[in-house]
Image (cartoon, rainbow, N blue to C red):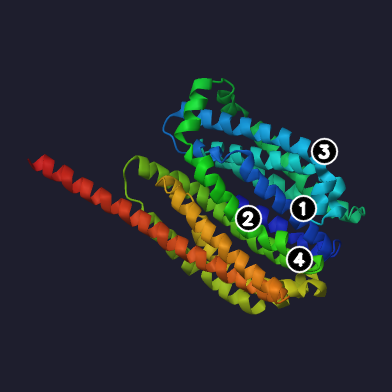
Amino acid sequence: MLSANVLSQLIAIAIYPFITRMYTPEIFGEFTWFTSMAAILTIVATGRYESAIVLPKSEKKAIAAFQLSLFLNVLFGVLFLLIVLVWKGQIASLFKQEKLISLLPLLPFFVFLSGLWQILNYFFIRQKKYYNISTYNLTQSSINSALKCFFGIKGFIQSGLIWGTFIGRLIAIVSSLMMGKASLKKILKLDKAEIIDTAKTYSNFPKFVLPQGLLILFAGNLPVLLLSAYFEMGRIGLFSLAFITGFCPVNLFCESVYQVLFRKMSERFQNKERIQQDFFLFCKTCIIAILPVFIIFAFISEWVYGILFGSEWKEAGFYLTLMLPWLFMVVLTASLAFIPDLFSQQKTAMKIEIIHVILIVISLALGIYFQNFNLAIALYCSASTLIRIVKLFWYFRLIKTYDSSLSGLLYTKSEQSNV
């Protein structure tokens, strides 16, 4: 799965030298705003119940979690579509995105597809159908990239990036559904009582995981959503390119590792086995294999961006340099983001994210106050790095406490055996 994800990422990155010569930084800024809004709304669409699909031992309860997530996703999609159709003009004016008013009706469908894939993704993780996930990533990346270039060549500059992403995701999901139809047959039978019981059992997900996810995405997308009202979209576009090209490989790596580690550690947790060794092995591997790449790139990023994407985009390399410490901490923490769910610590995780958002708002507000875009981004990246460090130490403490409790349990059992 990691190999497939790496290949899909290479495809996505390979087309950027072409599309940056077709689309302006302003268009990139608008595209990033659209996808940022979609990402935030996707979290709300499913109530985050899809995360519960992997956790239960009972297959019946896992299917109920799937059905519950799907129902909420459809319901949210319909309601959001009605809102956009009635008030799209007011929404565009509120966010100062009047140029995107004709594309706003596409946003609810974009959100629905994103939510549907989240549900399918967790279902395939539970079923250990990693090939289906890999196929989705490869298909989505290939078609997405090809269509962005096609629309750019044909002159659909204003909408090409958005339509290319939407169609690529749609085709990838259909392909994944066709491949997994045998496994998905079991979800056709509804058990309303089981669905209601599952909603109650995993009520912490909409209560704490959903707000936490919103806070995480809000924190990640706040520069685009907030700074676009105070600085020109060209600078937003430059930062967006750095953000996209920086986070695309990181996210795909983290998703691949997350999916495998989540399944592996949840099985160990269910069987009352130690997991600290897996935690240390992962962290050690990242430090040895990934950190040197980040250090080297810190010295050459502006030069690389100028060559790859054109001199107009060279400043994006500077923003990537500011992001590198944060990106490395994301590699460590995003791959282990399931740990609060594993230990039912969603409430504490939400509190950490609240602190994160407060720090980010302060950072961006200082940049706005001094009318300094670079200062806003530098402070934003520093705050995000600090929070990720705190998270990593917190994850370690949770795992250490759990392993220590197992040691005590084994000692007690040994004493009972001796007696």
Q: Which residue is mark 1?
A: 145
Identity of the amino acid at label 3? Val
Task: Note whether 286 is above or below 265 in the view shown.
Answer: below
**Residue found at x 65% / y 73%:** 366
* Residue 105 visible in the displayed image: no
SS of the residue at dot 4?
A: helix
**Residue found at x 55% / y 38%:** 50
| Disc 4 and disc 1 in contact, CB within 8 angstroms | no
For discs 1 and 3, the disc positioned in front in the rendered view: 3
Identity of the amino acid at label 1? Ser
For this rendering, which residue is in front, 141 or 224?
Answer: 224
For this rendering, which residue is in front, 283 or 345?
Answer: 345
Estimate the x, y position of residue 63 in percent, counting from the top left: 52, 29
Which numbered marker is on residue 86?
3
Q: Which residue is mark 2?
A: 218
For discs 1 and 2, the disc positioned in front in the rendered view: 2
SS of the residue at dot 2?
A: helix
Task: Note whether 258 is above or below 312 in the view shown.
Answer: above
| Alpha carbons under labels 1 and 3: distance apart | 32 Å
Identity of the amino acid at label 2? Phe
Task: Note whether 377 is above or below 353 in the view shown.
Answer: below
Of mark 1 and mark 3, the one earlier in the sequence is 3
Sort mark 4 into few (<14), some (14-19) or many (20+) by Cα contacts within 10 Å: many
| Alpha carbons under labels 1 and 2: distance apart | 26 Å
Of mark 4 and mark 1, the one earlier in the sequence is 1
| Alpha carbons under labels 4 and 3: distance apart | 29 Å
Identity of the amino acid at label 4? Ile
For this rendering, which residue is in front, 269 or 389?
Answer: 389
The answer to whether residue 304 is left or right of residue 5 is right
Of mark 1 and mark 2, the one earlier in the sequence is 1
Q: Which residue is mark 4?
A: 236
